Image (spheres, rainbow, N blue to C red):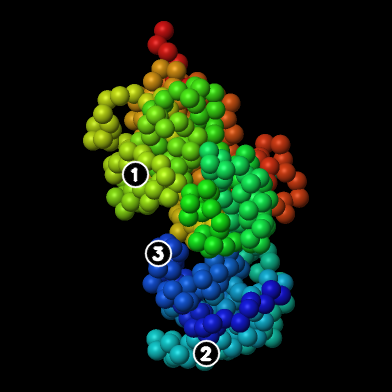
Amino acid sequence: MSEHKPASVPLWQQLQAVAQALAQVRRGVSGTAALESVPSALRPGVQALLFQALRQLGRAQALRAQLASRAPAPLPDALLCTALALAWDLDNAPYEPHTLVNQAVEAAKKTRSLQMQANFLNACLRRFLRERDALVRATDADVYAQWNHPEWWVKRLQKDHPEHWQDILRANNQAAPMTLRVNTARISRDALQTDWENHGLLSHPVGEQGLLLEQAHAVRDIPGFAEGLCSVQDAAAQCAAQILLDGLAPLSQPLRILDACAAPGGKTAHLLEMLNDKSEVTALDIDPQRCERIAQNLQRIGRTAKVIAADAALTKTWWDGQLFDAVLLDAPCTASGIVRRHPDVRWLRRETDVDKLAVIQKNLLKQLWPLVKPGGRLLYCTCSVFRAEGENQAKTFVEHNTNARLLPSLGHLRPQTRTTTAVLTDNLQGDHDGFYYALFEKLPAP
């Protein structure tokens, strides 16, 4: 039982907000957008509870089906499933199950649109407390309940990763740690880690430039963050700039680089940290507001790029005609590799999204490849574990472009936690998200 510290706001009020956010996610709203309407004083606690509920939503919905022959209306169903998701697993419940049940019923009584459902919710949840073990056993064989992912998602992983699909799903159901990239152009990783230790922040090295915090902290409280000495970025994502630039040319030489789908700017910032001041980086994103975020992140590290709001695939609208030494294409995808950080993704995606996004990825590769100099490179990556968005795209691209050579690259990385029993040779060391990398070199014309 992992009892939370006493909340500054009543638990019923947090559960009320969690249920409202969950109802929005079920309507197709992202968890991030749903949380924006939560008052700032409630938001940290509500987000923690919402994320835990989303990670256990499959089990909760299976239990609700045992307790009610018909699903209630969306909001009472969201509150019922929230309570079940948080209370069913005694070892990981954030509060005592009786407390969660009492406070969920209180939330119904204090919500005008739920008052008529309070007795129904109370009856379901009291029965759950009485028959918990039997109800859980009755749902154990349900794929939805066992893995807390849509069935199509589980089947696709079984096909794409027959030896590792269970490990991927287990990792997805764990909370991701807070990982930061050290700006080694300005400070060594060891020096920053020592400074953190002096401030009571314990961390572990991960990857070439990463530090993984033992406990997450608000970025404003992390020494060196405001000064641009570090940036929040998962260890798998930190590989992008390193792969693209490694061996491309002496880093003392000015290079012209394109980050084609750049927001929120983490990879753009990493490229600039590794390049000399004479190099030119263009950062594109289709969303003007997200472009503002890129500019803000670059300002914090004290570097600049040419930031353009444009559709990367419509090259005539933004390209100046000069070829690039290297292009980084972090293509739009299902985000199936970062479910640990965004547990709503599994419930927002539909199976048809995979093929729709694959079409977009294929077109971006087609449109951006002509912008690469002969002898230059394009790094294609996605934060996805689905082969349709990774390995299959790379194979098709090479087959249709005789001037493209696939260089040694990481391929599919599977999400992995620090508690993973075996770190396999085809994965990175340490804790990281799922990702895909394929590095292409453009061969000179014969």
Q: Residues within 10 Å of mark 1 (few under 14, many from 20)?
A: many
Res 112 quadrant in image: bottom left
Residue 285 circle label: 1
Q: Is residue 415 visible?
A: no
Res 408 quadrant in image: top right
Which mark lies nearer to you, 2 or 1?
Answer: 1
Q: Is residue 116 visible?
A: yes
Identify the amino acid type marked 3.
Ala
Query: Helix, strand, or loop for circle 3?
Result: helix
Q: CA distance from mark 3 to mark 1?
A: 19 Å
Which mark lies nearer to you, 3 or 1?
Answer: 1
Q: Nearer the viewer, residue 158 or 246?
A: 246
Q: Which residue is mark 2?
A: 106
Q: Which residue is mark 3?
A: 33
Q: Nearer the viewer, residue 23 or 329?
A: 329
Query: Helix, strand, or loop for circle 2?
Result: helix
Pinpoint residue 373: horizontal percent, then vertical percent. Answer: 38, 20
Q: Residue visible at 54% across and 82% down?
A: 8
Query: Helix, strand, or loop for circle 1?
Result: strand
Pinpoint residue 169: horizontal percent, then vertical percent. Answer: 63, 54
Query: In the drawing, does residue 434 fall left or right of residue 43?
Result: right
Q: Residue visible at 61% across and 42% down?
A: 188
Q: CA distance from mark 2 to mark 1?
A: 45 Å
Q: Residues within 10 Å of mark 2 (few under 14, many from 20)?
A: some
Q: CA distance from mark 2 to mark 3?
A: 26 Å
Query: In the drawing, does residue 32 fall left or right of residue 56?
Result: left
Residue 68 circle label: none
Identify the amino acid type marked 2.
Glu
